[in-house]
Each structure stands twice: as structure tokens, then as C-alpha cells.
Image: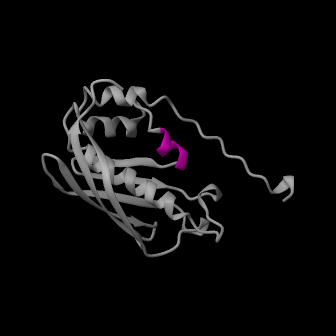
Amino acid sequence: MSEHDAREKMIRFFDPARTVLAARTLPGLEIVHAFMNGTLPLPPAVALIGAVVEHAERGRVVMSLVPDESHFNALGTMHGGIIATLFDTALGCSVHTTIIAGRAYTTLSIGVNYVRGVTMATGKIVAEGTVEHVGRSTALVRGTLRDADNKLLATAESTCMLFDAPRSP
């Protein structure tokens, strides 16, 4: 490897404590809207992959990501873990839009089915998470990942556990 092959990417993220504290006093939909309009910083993991929230309504969230070289595996396609992270975020946020202040959630399981490879030529990809069911203690959510031509790239399904938010961070 030579020095001229090196790449750098600066990641800017903010202390997630503000978001954790907001979750105790704001309904989930308001928090996701605050991610969209920039009044709350995106979680560091979301900043790391470069995803953004494009749309949020109760039970549905749309997020996007523009692939770059830092997302790729040794074969020149987007690493499946990046896609899984995008799905986990979009699907989790869709569950978040359904909960009241003082409640929280965590992913119990996520399954991703990859349909097409994602490369630089794919351009912007869009993940949509839609809640299928919210109960007292669990939520089921499904998602799709599509390109700008609406071609299906992947699907996902997740189960989340709902619980009272811890009182201290």
C-alpha cells in the first residue's frame, strides 16, 4: 500500500446524553422529528454511517444514505453490516414514533434479506420502516431498502422489546 491510496473520513457526532434525556420527557415521534430538523443530534452510530431521517410519521420512518467507499467490503459492494445498521435504525425509529415519553425500546432480533448488491453506482438508498404491531411489551416492524429507481435492494424484519426508560442515564 502506498500513501496516495489512503483515504480519510471525518465523522462529527455529538454527546448522545441530550437525546437520552429528551426521551424521558418527549414522545418518540417528537424525538424523531427533532432528528429530522436538527434540534436533537442524530445518535453517533447514525452519524458514523452518514444516514439521515427524511420522513417520520406515527409507525413509519424513511431514512436515506449515499454509499461511499468507507461503507464497502473487500468485493467493492456495501458491507451487509452497514445495511443492517441502516435497517436497525430505520425500523427502530419507526417503533420510536409509537411510544410515549418515558418509554424505551431495544431490538430483540433483526433479520435482513439482501436482494441486490449496493455499489457507488447505486447512488442514494432509501430504507423505510413500517410498524406492523405494537403491544404492551413488544413491537413487530418490517422494512424495505430501495434505490432511486425504486428497485428492491433488501428487506428486513425486526422485533423490539418495549419497557419503561431507566431513570438515570
User: Which residue is farthest bottom?
Assistant: 115
The N terminus: image quadrant: bottom right
Residue 148 lies within the magenta run: no
Q: Quadrant of residue 130?
A: bottom left
Nearest the eye: 77 or 168: 168
Q: Quadrant of residue 66?
A: bottom right
User: Which residue is farthest left?
Assistant: 136
Nearest the eye: 102 or 69: 102
x, y percentage for residue 5? 81, 57
The C terminus: image quadrant: top left
In the rendered view, would you say 113 is above or below 72? below
x, y percentage for residue 74? 66, 67
Q: Is residue 4 left or right of residue 120?
A: right
Magenta segment: 44-49
Residue positioned 31% across, 46% down in the render:
106
Most frequent secondary structure within the magenta stretch: helix
